[in-house]
Image (tube, rainbow, N blue to C red):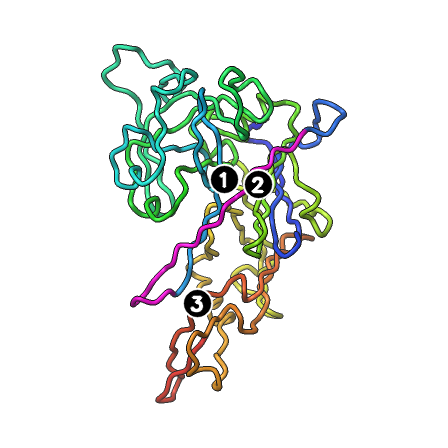
Amino acid sequence: MLQSNNRAAPAVLRFAGVISLLLRTSSAWLWASEEAASIHSIPLKKQYVPVQKDSKTVAYKTAYFGEVHVGAPHQTFTVVFDTGSGHLILPSTGCASPACAKHKRYNRTSSHSAVDIEYDGTKLRPDATERDQVAIAFGTGEVQGEFVSEDICLQPGTAEQGANRPGCVNLRVVLASKMTEDPFSHFDFDGVLGLGLQTLALSPEFSFFGQMLVQNPQMEPRFSVFLAQNEGVDSVISFGGHEEKFTAGEIQWVPVAMSELGYWQVKLKNVKIGNQVVEECQDGSCRAILDTGTSLLGVPRQAVRSMHRMLARPVPEEMSHQPGIDCRRLPGSQLDFEMGDAVMSLSPEDYSRPLPFNMTMPNQDKWRLFC
């Protein structure tokens, strides 16, 4: 159902208190029945990991993760649902890396639904002395692993049901035999569930969302992510659509650009900071990847200096000597990403790091705090 030349469309929605994503494939309107397919929602936990400089916390990395259920009888793991990668990766009991030891590890011998395979799906021979390996690099860190075919479910169930029930899929999985310390030892989640387009995976059989649609034709080919702004509200990822109770506006669809690369990537018509247009994107040639696996806002190197200058604002003199200054609470310009008719807007609370920094004033023998 998901082909590399398919067009796919992400939607930008305004939810109550947060901007979120609804992603669909190009076959979104080819329903298998007249009844709306059921939605499978998974609550997400939020974790902050401080980024420190000179023993001070200058920013936070943030991760949202939820549970999936693997094998028969099922083993439950926490995973990051990552639109920027293409594979389900779980640490295995055969992994001795310190990063693996800090997390729950998949036990191959405990699951009677598991099949050891090579990367192309060929069943591993009982007398095999070698097997296919893979190395997968992330923005930071790397995973090395082997392959297994296994049943994956979004909700817990009985072993006898296997993958033959709604919300389950048989998938080729990467079992990590090595995981780097950074970043995997710093976070609480066990593994990564890639939700990129299937061209980002080794083959379509590794694509969780692609195989979910093939093996669950009654499911509407959409998934959505709601990231709550307030700590007391649960974040959620939903497969098969979105939950209306979280929305506070109409859905706006934006076509995916260069889908053959495998990313949920969109064209940026303009990037504005306040009333100023970022020159590097003024000609409409910029693109952005919608990546649920990172909490950072990444920009091209050539645009970093000008964007920092446009976003920076001085801390008021009367506050500069006060302890505990939080830049997220200080007024600043709105950051707008224009994607055709849809606009994604970020406030200073969204894009600012907490701690201000010292800046020497031009042609003056003094410094001033800036956010």
What residue would you read off at disc 1? 66
The amino acid beneath tag 1 is Gly
Q: Could you tell whether 259 is left or right of 119 in the image?
A: right
The amino acid beneath tag 3 is Arg
Where residue 281 appears, x then y in whole percent? Answer: 55, 59
Where residue 74 appears, x then y in whole percent? Answer: 45, 24
Q: Earlier along the polypeptide chain: callout 1 or callout 3?
A: 1
**Main SS type for the magenta part?**
strand
Q: Do the numbered discs 1 and 2 sit on residues whose CB atoms are within 8 Å?
A: yes
Q: Earlier along the polypeptide chain: callout 2 or callout 3?
A: 2
Q: Which mark is residue 305?
A: 3
Q: Residue at x 70, y 43 (%)?
A: 244
Q: Which mark is residue 237?
A: 2
Mark 1 nearby-residue class (10 Å; few <14, some 14–19, many ≥20) = many
Q: Could you tell whether 301 is left or right of 227 in the image?
A: left
The amino acid beneath tag 2 is Ile
Q: Residue at x 48, y 56 (%)?
A: 297
Under circle 3, the secondary element is: helix
Q: Quadrant of residue 224?
A: top right
Under circle 2, the secondary element is: strand
Q: Residue at x 63, y 40 (%)?
A: 9
